[in-house]
Image: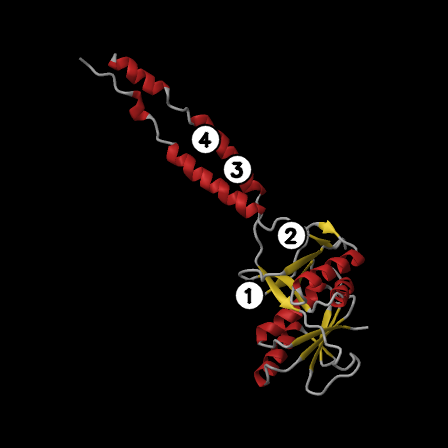
Amino acid sequence: MGKAKKHEAESLQIPMSSMIDVVFQLLIYFIVTSTREIPEAHLAVNLPTPSTTSSTKIKPKLLELQVMPGQVMLQGTPRSPEMIKENLTALAKLDAEQTVIVKVSPLARTEELVRVLDLCRGVGLTKLNVVTLR
Amino acid sequence: MRRKPSSEQLETPITSLIDVVFQLIIFFVVTAASEKDLVDENVKLAQAKYAKAEQKRAANTIIINVPRDGNVNIAMQPVTPKQLHQILSSSVSKFGNQMTVILRCDGEVLFRDVDRIIQVVGKAGLYRIRISAEALQ
């Protein structure tokens, strides 16, 4: 009688091996379909307010960067990326609060603008205004 | 009398393994689904060396994807400039003009296309505009 009860208890066990297979299939599916989350930084694009002067006039003591396709100009002079970084670092040391006007050519790529904005933030220049070169 | 060795002693206890695997599945389901519809994976962001990655997104943000093919979309839904203006204007009327607009632009997109969108955003009354970049640090 005892042996019959024990046999009943054994037969009530749920077979888990197939469930493991199904669960692993699901896991592999979700691992394969999930994508790596790219860490994003958000660079502020400050538009000039209507009270500022037009883009053709430059206020004194404003730093001007021009982003053209394939090159960047600082105060109207084309410079290499290394020179730009050096100059901006030196200027930021003098006055990190100065306003930087970033004039972007419509044909410049977003990547070039992002590089310049990122560089400015990297050297400590945070007051950036972006305008379009007409 | 010899006792037949019980076959149960050789079985591997796998019930705990099932629990662990389910936890992993739930993790991948949740992380795969979150923000999947807001972010256009066709957009290859420009890289930023110095800017730090945002730890958490500010409340009341609108994400506008600008892929290379020029089909501007919000949450994977293509929008024309007119529709974009309507969406932004209605958002401003509901949440005010303190909303942040995040432009996820492909690195190869020309600035004139981005400027067009910035103009639409400005006309809707929003001025907090951010360009998204892939943070390398």
Residue type for callout 4? Ile
Give the Cα distance between marks 4 and 2. 34 Å
SS type, badge 3? helix
Amino acid type shown at disc 1: Lys
**Amino acid beneath label 2:** Leu
x, y percent for residue B43: 68, 54
In terms of image quadrants, where is residue B110?
bottom right
- The furthest residue to the bottom: A60
* Quadrant location, the C terminus of chain B: bottom right
Q: To which residue does mark 3 refer?
A: A28
Three-letter code, disc 3 = Ile
Position of residue A77 relative to residue B35, above or below, is: below
**Is residue A102 found left or right of B26 in the rendered image?**
right
Q: Which residue is mark 4?
A: A20
Are the residues flagged by discs 1 and 3 in contact, CB closer than 8 Å?
no
Chain letter, disc 3 residue: A
Mark 3 is surrounded, within 10 Å at the Cα level, by few (under 14), some (14 to 19) or many (20 or more) other residues, namely: few
Residue B124 relative to residue B15: left or right = right
Q: Secondary structure at mark 4?
A: helix
Chain assignment, label 1: B
Q: Which mark is residue B52?
A: 1
Q: Quadrant of residue A118?
A: bottom right
Residue A89 percent coordinates (x, y): 59, 79
Which residue is more in the foreground, A93 or A35? A35
Answer with the quarter of the image where residue B124 lies. bottom right
Q: Which label number is shown at residue B38?
A: 2
Crowd rating for badge 4 (residues with CA inside 10 Å; few <14, some 14–19, many 20+): some
Up the image or down, A62 lies above or below B125; here it is below
Q: How far from the left and from the top, in percent, is residue A59?
A: 73, 85
Q: Residues within 10 Å of mark 2 (few under 14, many from 20)?
A: some
Quadrant where the image shows the N terminus of chain B = top left
